[in-house]
Every structure is written in structure tokens, then in C-alpha cells.
Amino acid sequence: MLSDEAKADALEHHLIAQTNSHPPFPTASEIALQIESQPIRKGVGNLFVSRQGNVKRLEPMPEKPTLQDFFRLRFTATSNHCLQSANHAMKAGMSEEVVLACLLHDTVQELIKVDHGWWSAQMYEPYVSEKVVFAIRYHQALRFYEDKEYGYMYPDLYRQIFGSDYKPEPYIEQTYQRVRKHRWYVESRMVTVNDLYAFEKGVNPTLDQFTDIIGRHFKQPHEGLGFDNSASAHMWRSMATPDHPL
Ligand SMILES: [Fe+2]
Ligand SMILES: [Fe+2]
């Protein structure tokens, strides 16, 4: 019954209302209630569970696996996010160490997700500088705290996955208070600033872009990752062979 003009107006109002609203975020207690409706816990690593159907057989790793081999053959769930973050950091003119920290920051989620900043830092500790380790370890805590000076806002994704009223646990709060006064705070903060949840369309960074940075800042063991007897070699082996029953 509306005139064409009135229809166009109504449609426009409808579209504006749609873009400005989203379903309400769950509360932390609603998220806690979901726990017993799932056969797996949320902190499990991507390599150990399939979100759809059964897990797939994995291609074997080369005898002496490199970081690049892990990206290609095992970091399949995390590599796009990490490449996008590193690409963003590179384009923003960040230091090579920050770019590397962005490239590696979430890859340990193939092994384990819970407390991934600390796990990731430990996994990379034998192979990268202390500053890169620091940046990776603390991005997990810093991401809960806004820093407008550096353009970091609390992400809606966390309202969705932790709950709208979630308060970080005391160890996270204490870590944040300590790290914000540290001389490498900015390096870790920059991992959160480049930690993208919405990607630019048509931007498909590849690992080749980072070959030089990896070459300069990642100490590739000549025995291969997993076989160099480092403190984190078992973590690399666990990602290489996640089907070993023990
Ligand atoms: Fe992360
Ligand atoms: Fe991330």
C-alpha cells in the first residue's frame, strides 16, 4: 500500500537498523552453561579435534621440519589469521621483531588454546629473541585491556566468546599491571593492535613475504624442529604427530 518513495524509506530504515544491531552477547554464566553441552573442552588444540565430521589423516612431516613446513602442513587453522596479522604489522612499518611476533602469536593454538600466550612463548623461546618471546607471551593478557593511545579497543569477539560481563581473572589483571610498565610493553601491545578479527577483502598474504624476517630472527635448528633436544622439542613433535596415542 506504500508509495515507491515510502517503500524506499522503509527499506532504508530497515537496513540501517540491521547494520546497527546485532544479537545480544551472552553473559559469562550463559557461556559456562554451554560446557556440558559439548563433547570437547574449549581449550583443546585445533589439530586434535574436528569441528565438522571426523579428523583427517595428516601428511607426514619432512625428516627435519622447518618453521615453514609447520606452517604448510600443521598450522592450517591458525596460519591465515597469523599471516594477516603479520602482513598488517609489516604494512604499518612495525619492527621485524614485532612482525615476527605477529606471525607466530597464535600458532600454538594448533596444540592448545587455553593460556595460549604462555604456551606459545614457551614453544618459541629456544628459537627467537627474548623481546619476541615477551611480545607473544603477554598479548594474551593485554588483549583484554584497551589502550586508545595505540588504537586498541576491546574486541566484540571477546564479548561473544568470554561473555558480555566477563572480568579477566586476577593473574591476567596482575600480568597486565606488570607488563604495562615494562620497557617492551609496546612490542606486546602491537601484537594486539595487529591482531585482526576482520580482514581486508582480497588480501591474501603468503609466508614468502616473511622469508627474510624468519631467516634473520628465527634460529632454525639443523636437526629439525622437534629433534634438537630443546626445552620445547616435545611440543613440536606433538604437533607433527598428533595421532600418536601416548
Ligand atoms: Fe592470541
Ligand atoms: Fe590472534
Image (cartoon, grey):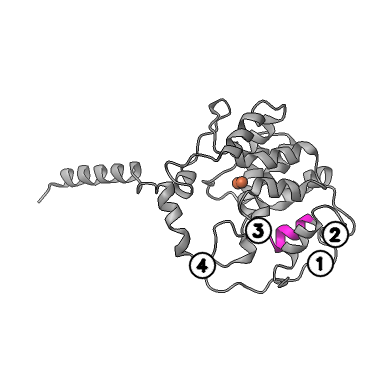
Q: Is residue 224 left or right of residue 188?
A: right
Q: Magenta region: which residues?
A: 67-76
User: Measured along the vertical axis of the image, is residue 81 above or below residue 147?
Assistant: below
Secondary structure of the residue carrying numbered label 4: loop
Label 1 and label 2: CA atoms lie apart by 9 Å
Callout 3 amino acid:
Glu
Q: Which residue is mark 3?
A: 110
Label pair 3/1, CB-CB below 8 angstroms: no
Question: Disc 2 designates what residue?
Answer: 224
Work out whether mark 3 precedes mark 2 in sequence or the reverse, and give the earlier one: 3
The crowding category of the residue bearing disc 1, from other C-alpha atoms within 10 Å (few below 14, some 14 to 19, many at least 20), is few
In three-dimensional space, the C-alpha distance between marks 4 and 2, rounded to whole angstroms, equals 35 Å
Q: Main secondary structure of the magenta part?
A: helix
Residue 174: horizontal and vertical position, in percent? 61, 33
Closer to the camera: disc 4 or disc 2?
4
Which residue is labeled 4 in the image? Answer: 39
For label 4, count other residues whose C-alpha is less than 10 Å away and answer few (under 14), some (14-19) or many (20+): few
The reply to whether discs 1 and 2 touch (Cβ–Cβ < 8 Å) is yes
Q: For the residue marked with disc 4, what is the amino acid?
A: Pro
Q: Look at 76% across and 71% down and name the residue there.
A: 60
Give coordinates of residue 231: x percent, y percent.
82, 52
Q: Earlier in the sequence, mark 4 or mark 1?
A: 4
Report if residue 72 lies within the magenta region. yes
Count residues near mark 3 (Cα–Cα under 10 Å), then give few for <14, some for 14-19, many for 20+: many
118 vs 236, nearest the viewer: 118
Q: In what element is the residue under mark 2?
A: loop
Give how far apart the Cα atoms at labels 3 and 4 are: 18 Å
Q: Which mark is residue 62?
A: 1
Between marks 1 and 2 in the image, the one whose residue lies nearer the viewer = 2
Mark 3–mark 2 Cα distance, whole angstroms, equals 19 Å
Location of residue 194 in the rendering, given as x and y in whole percent from the top left corner: 61, 39
